[in-house]
Each structure stands twice: as structure tokens, then as C-alpha cells.
Amino acid sequence: MSTPPALRIGVLAPLSRPGWTEAGRHLLAGLELAADEVAAAGGIGGRPLELLVRDTAADPRRAEAAVDELAALGAVALAGEYHSVVARAVAARAETLGLPYLCSSAVIDALTDAPAERVARLAPAQSHGWRLYAEFLLGAGHTRLAVATEPSAYWAAGTRILREHLAPRGGTVTEFDARALEPAALADALAADGATALLLLTGFPDPAVGLVGAVRRAARRDPRLADVLIGAPAGQPEFAEWAALLGDEGAGVPFLRYLPARPSPLGARVEAALRDRLGAAPSFVAFEGYDTVTVLAEALRANGTDRAAVAGAWPRVAVEGTRGEIRFTRPSASAPVWQWAGPPLQVADRDPADPTRFRTLLVR
């Protein structure tokens, strides 16, 4: 008796520099764990899932070429990616080719320039999470912000969201070009500006790690910086590399993560399995990977195993993920993609008393 052919899922993740490789590794761990569990449960109508993994290295052009290759190899859907500028390129190419794409972890609001029927997303839209982050800053008394930023559609969108949310409340946002200023010079400019919070809208580890160290050192000699909050809304402190590179200096830096306040039984089971695979605590990105395959498996079971059937399943999917029930909606015909409206949001940091432990500062 012949073995039925596998259902191929194309996977895109940043697995080499300059991509955020730790995020890519966690994303892949979640995707692979869920695919293994699907196979162990008998597959989809007896057919296992085969993950065809391609490294994007945070390069949109490389990702587009990978989409073309995966389409030619017969992938029924695409999954993954962490970097927003790369996910935008993937979404546009996938829509053109008629290939369903479930974006795991990229948050930029404009994932596509025009409404796309074949693209869905698990991660919350950037404006949703970053508004919560702005509310956290306001609640902590920070109305005068500075951002250290680099050229990117993602960072520019984040700066705009913060400015629009703070302006009606009398808040201001000053931009510092992290490419033009050395970390020590940026710390001096921050002291002169008088901002009470500096947000890192930059790549990791460089220049983010150097900026944190420069501001922390400057604060020890300059009283104007003594109470300045360093923040990282994009989630850099979530990962072990942050703690390894910065140690105690990396504690007390609030960031966004997409986890509930308490795990569900499914979430707790998956957390333990992911910890075994990674040899470390899984980040929210690992859970996004697991949930991605969970959704695709349900779409394939319930709607059929061809590309059109998977794309047509987005408005009908209802599946229990590690972080809650997943359903996709489009608030209007002009919304760019199908969106999970219910991912949990929290602002957290690493505890200064124990940087290996996270503190939850705000949950929604």
C-alpha cells in the first residue's frame, strides 16, 4: 500500500544575519512541534504535513524568490516570517501567485497595499499593540518621549502611532537617527532634550545593545538621565540573547509580548514541549509558530487541501490555539488582510532583582 503524499507547507523565517535569528529559531520550533503533533495524530486525511523551510535573512528580495520556489514545489500554503518588511514582500507575492499565506509574527498594519483575500495574520496589527504601549507610558507619567530609530517602514509606522496617540494628551516625540549618532552622542542628545523615556526603534543586537549600555553608563554621571526609562516596544528583551548581552543593564526595559496573563492547559503543555526543544523558555514567537500550523491544519481538514480551499477557509476557521480561540475577521472590505482580532497583549519587562524573570506590567 503506497504512502499518501505529504501536504507541503512553505515556511519562511529569519535564520541567518542580519535577520533576528533567535526569533526565527523560536518561530521554527513552534511550527515544527505542531507539525509533528499533526503527524502523530494521523495527519490530514492520512497525509502528513511537510515543512519546506527557507531562510529569509531579513531580505525581502530573497523572500520573494523563496515564495516563487515554494509555489513551484507545490506548497499548498505559506507560513511564518517575523520581520514586517519581509512579510510585506511575501504577502504581495503570495497574493499574486494565488498562494495562501498565514503570517505568524509580523505586525505592520499595511501588510499589503491593497486588500488581499489569500493573506491572513495571527500577530496583532502594530497600531493595536503600540497604542497599548503608549497607554502604558502615559500611565507611568511619560509624555515627553524620544525614539532612537533607523530607516524602515516598520519603525516609521511605530513612530507615527506613538506620536498620534500621545499628541492629543500633550505628549511629544523627538526622533534621533541611530545611524548618524554614536551611542554616547545619542545619550548626550537625550540628556539635552529632556525626554523622560527613550524607545529603541532599532535593529538588534546592533545598535540597540550599544545604546542601552551608553545611556545606562551616562545616567551614572549625568543626573538628567537618572530617571529616564528605556523602552523597546518591538520586543527585543523577550529573548535570551538580550539578557546574555546586557545582563543587569537589560532589566527594567518594558516591551510588548503577545501572551495571556496565565497560560491555558494547552498553552502550558505546549510551553513545556517547546522548552524541551529549545533548551530555554519559549518566547511568544514560538507560540505564534505553533498556532500557525494549528490553524493551517484545521483549514486543510475542514475546507480541503488545495490552495483555493485553504484561502477560502479564513472566515470560517475557529480553532483553539495556545493563547485563546482563533478566528479571523475583516472589519471592512478595505482591510488589508484577514486578521485574528483576539491575540492577547501585555507590556512586560525583565525584573531588575532577577533579569531571568519577567514582570507583567499591563495586560489587555
Image (cartoon, helix red, strand yellow):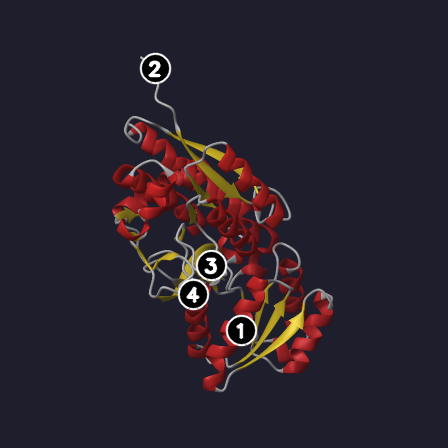
Q: Which mark is residue 129?
A: 4
Q: Which of the marked residues, 4 or 3, is nearer the chain's N terminus?
A: 3
> Where the C terminus falls, by quadrant?
bottom left
Q: Which mark is residue 107?
A: 3
Residue drawn at (32%, 47%) of the image: 312
Q: Report how far apart the C-alphas of labels 1 and 3 lie in the structure.
A: 15 Å
Q: Residue 286, percent across and down?
A: 43, 46
Q: Which of the marked residues, 2 or 4, is nearer the chain's N terminus?
A: 2
Q: Nearer the viewer, mark 1 or mark 2?
A: 2
Q: Write down the residue under mark 1.
A: 160
Amino acid marked by disc 1: Arg
Q: Which of the marked residues, 3 or 2, is nearer the chain's N terminus?
A: 2
Q: Nearer the viewer, mark 4 or mark 3?
A: 3
Q: Residue 262, percent across and down?
A: 30, 55
Amino acid marked by disc 4: Gly
Residue drawn at (31%, 12%) of the image: 1
Vertical arrangement, residue 72 with respect to residue 113, above or below: above
Q: Report how far apart the C-alphas of labels 1 and 2 lie in the structure.
A: 56 Å
Q: Write down the residue under mark 2.
A: 2
Using residue 264 as the reference point, say whether residue 49 is left or right of it.
right
Secondary structure under tag 3 reads: loop
